[in-house]
Image (cartoon, rainbow, N blue to C red):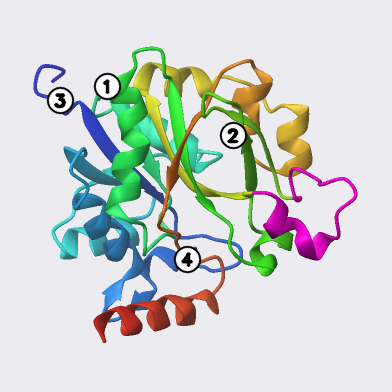
Amino acid sequence: MSELSPKVVAIIPARYDSTRFPGKPLAMIAGKPMIQHVYERVKQARKIEEVFVATDDDRIATGVGNFGGRYVMTSRSCRSGTDRCAEAAGKIDPKIVVNVQGDEPLISPATVDAVVAPLMNSDSCMMSTAAVLITNEESLLSGNVVKVVLDNNGDALYFSRNVIPSIRDANLHDYLKRFKFLKHLGIYAYRYDFLKKLTTMKETPLESAESLEQLRVLENGYKIRVAITEEDTISVDIPGDIAAVKEFLAKKNR
């Protein structure tokens, strides 16, 4: 299979039993299940050869099949979307795996391409992700918006739910005037061999404290290249977030 295997695949991990939003991948948005919106937008990325949904639920598999999408069945024992991606990738044998969250119905194809590019341009790059400039105070102060700071090479120094950096001797309301803060977007690209290694690493203290899995990579001494994109996205965490996505799509159609 390896000779025929695609080199760059996007895998969308999707599970039915979300605590805050059961059945989330099949939630309808503008006449389509959310997972279809994600799938179709990722398919538009020029650097992606194949797209798969990785799931452990027959209802999601059936939903994906109904719109002509491809899926890979995975075990129910996967602890995270990263583990689910790795298991699915083991059945595909790609060179590069892009992990696209199944709750990102507005993910930009350009962002997907931007995340893949560092791995295509440098053999030393093992993992990459994306970030966008924060333009409003609400996002800056929200604990649900993950922030990232970079070194001079564009690699992540740290990710946090808190405001980073903290600007000394500045009023919090002046922060956006003093620094270009970055919002982390939950999309990752990995070399497949590194993805397999990542799933064998134990949870680390900072990862546990912030509840951010990517910190495990930094704590183990590896680098994450960060692509800066101009297009933000709207994640769907709870049913109420659907309205914001519908509003965005309606404005775009108008």
Lower sequence index among marks 1 and 4: 1
Q: CA distance from mark 1 to mark 2?
A: 20 Å
Residue placed under numbered mark 2 in the picture: 214
User: Which structural element holds mark 3?
Assistant: loop
Q: In the rendered image of this protein, does residue 138 appear above or below residue 44? A: below
Q: Residue drawn 71% across and 50% down? A: 161
- Answer whether labels 2 and 3 touch (C-beta < 8 Å): no
The residue tagged with tag 2: helix, strand or loop? loop
Circle on res. 95: 1
Pair 2/3: label in front:
2
Q: Position of residue 169 (x, y in %)?
A: 90, 49
Residue at 31% across, 31% down: 117
Q: Which quarter of the figure is the N terminus placed in?
A: top left
Which of these two is toward me, 67 or 161? 161
Question: What residue did someone put label 4 on?
Answer: 234
Which one is closest to the eye, mark 1 or mark 4? Answer: 4
User: Is the C terminus in the top left, top right, bottom left or bottom right quadrant?
Assistant: bottom left
Question: Start and end of the magenta stretch?
Answer: 162-179
Label 3 sits on what residue type?
A: Ser
Q: Which callout, 1 or 2, points at the residue further toward the start of the chain?
A: 1
3D distance between C-alphas at marks 2 and 3: 27 Å
Badge 1 marks a residue whose secondary structure is loop
The residue identified by callout 3 is 5
